[in-house]
Image (spheres, rainbow, N blue to C red):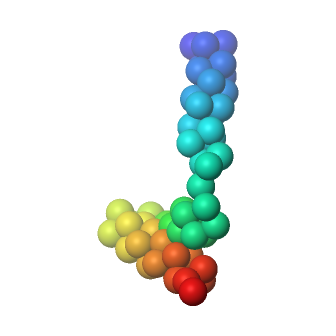
Amino acid sequence: MKRTLIPITLLLAAILSTGCADMNKRQRNTAAGAAIGGVAGAVLTGGSTVGTLGGAAIGGVIGHETTRR
């Protein structure tokens, strides 16, 4: 099981990481803000789904607004 799981995980990571290659600065900041906010929301609420999603939403908005002109 472990011998097949590692190559599959590496392949998926390579495929998924190429989706961010052509993002502009606002999109990158939005995605980074959502990721950081989701982690922060999960930590602060003890892993609550609502806290994680709320943190991701708030983080995404903050990341988006930091590049607003």
- Left or right of 55? Residue 3 is right
Q: Position of residue 11 (x, y in %)?
A: 62, 24
The number of numbered badges drawn on the structure is: 0
Between residue 18 and residue 5, name the one nearer to us. 18
Query: The C terminus appears in which quarter of the rendering?
Result: bottom right
Q: Residue furthest left?
A: 50
Image quadrant where one finds the N terminus: top right
**Residue 7 vs residue 47: left or right?**
right
Residue 54 found in image quarter: bottom left
Above or below residue 64? Residue 15 is above
Q: Nearer the viewer, residue 45 or 17?
A: 17
Residue 24 found in image quarter: bottom right
Report the residue that reaches farthest toward the bottom: 69
Using the rendered image of the protein, determine whether residue 39 is visible from the camera's viewpoint: no
Rendered position, 12 above or below 17: above
Identify the residue at image location x=66%, y=27%: 10
Identity of the residue drawn at 55% across and 64% down:
27
